[in-house]
Amino acid sequence: MKTLKVTKNIWFHELVPKEYGDVTERDLRFLDINLLNAMQRLRDYFGKPMIINDDTFNWRGLRTPDFDRYNPGSMHSIWRAYDHHIVGVDPEEEREYIIDNRDEFYPEIMAIEDKVNWIHLDTRYRPDNTLLVFKP
C-alpha cells in the first residue's frame, strides 16, 4: 500500500479503512490538519503510540458507505473526526486531560465523546467555540 506520513507519528493508512487503497494528493486535500495536529500533540504529551486503525480497528477514521453503520452526517464521513486510544493510557485519564487543557492546548477540538473506552475527537462547527462533551 502506498501511504504517506501526515504528522510526525501518524500515517495516512491509519486514518482510512484497509480497503481504501493507495493515497493520492486528491485524498489529502480533505484531511483536517488542525485535528491531526491536535492528535499529534496528544501523542507527544503522553509519549506512547496512538492507535487509530490497525489490524483490529478498521473504521475509527474515515467512514465510507462501505461501513455497516455509515452515516453521511457523521464527522467521520467528512474527515473531521477520529477515534483512537493511546497504548497504556486509560481513556478516562486522556479525556480528562483534554477537557482540562482544551482551551490552552487543543482549541481546535470541538467535541469529545464521554463514557466510552476510546477517545472520539472532532472539529465540528460550534459558533460559541465551547467544547461539546456528548454521550453515545
Image: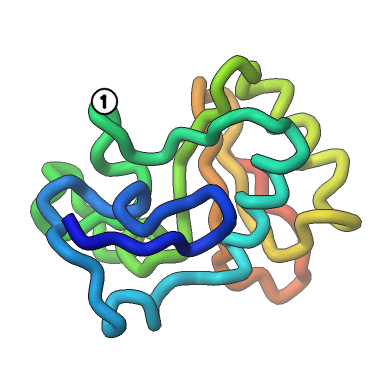
Residue 107 quadrant = bottom right
The amino acid on which the numbered mark 1 sits, given as a three-letter code, is: Thr
Task: Examine the image and state in which quarter residue 78 appears.
Answer: bottom left
Residue sitting nearer the eye, 34 or 87:
87
Residue 76: image quadrant is bottom left
Number of labels in the image equals: 1
- Circle 1 is placed at which residue position? 56
How far across and how far down the image is residue 24, in percent? 24, 77
Compared to residue 10, the image places residue 133 above or below, namely above
Q: Badge 1 local density, few (<14 within 10 Å), some, or many (20+)?
A: few
Tell me if residue 2 comes above or below residue 87 in the rendering. Answer: below
- The residue at the point 71 percent across, 50 percent down is 41
Q: Position of residue 3 (x, y in %)?
A: 29, 60
Q: Residue at x 61, y 23 (%)?
A: 91
Q: Position of residue 54 (x, y in %)?
A: 30, 34
Name the residue: 70% across, 75% down: 127
**In screen coordinates, is 35 left or right of 38?**
left
Residue at the limit of the structure toward the right, as seen here: 104
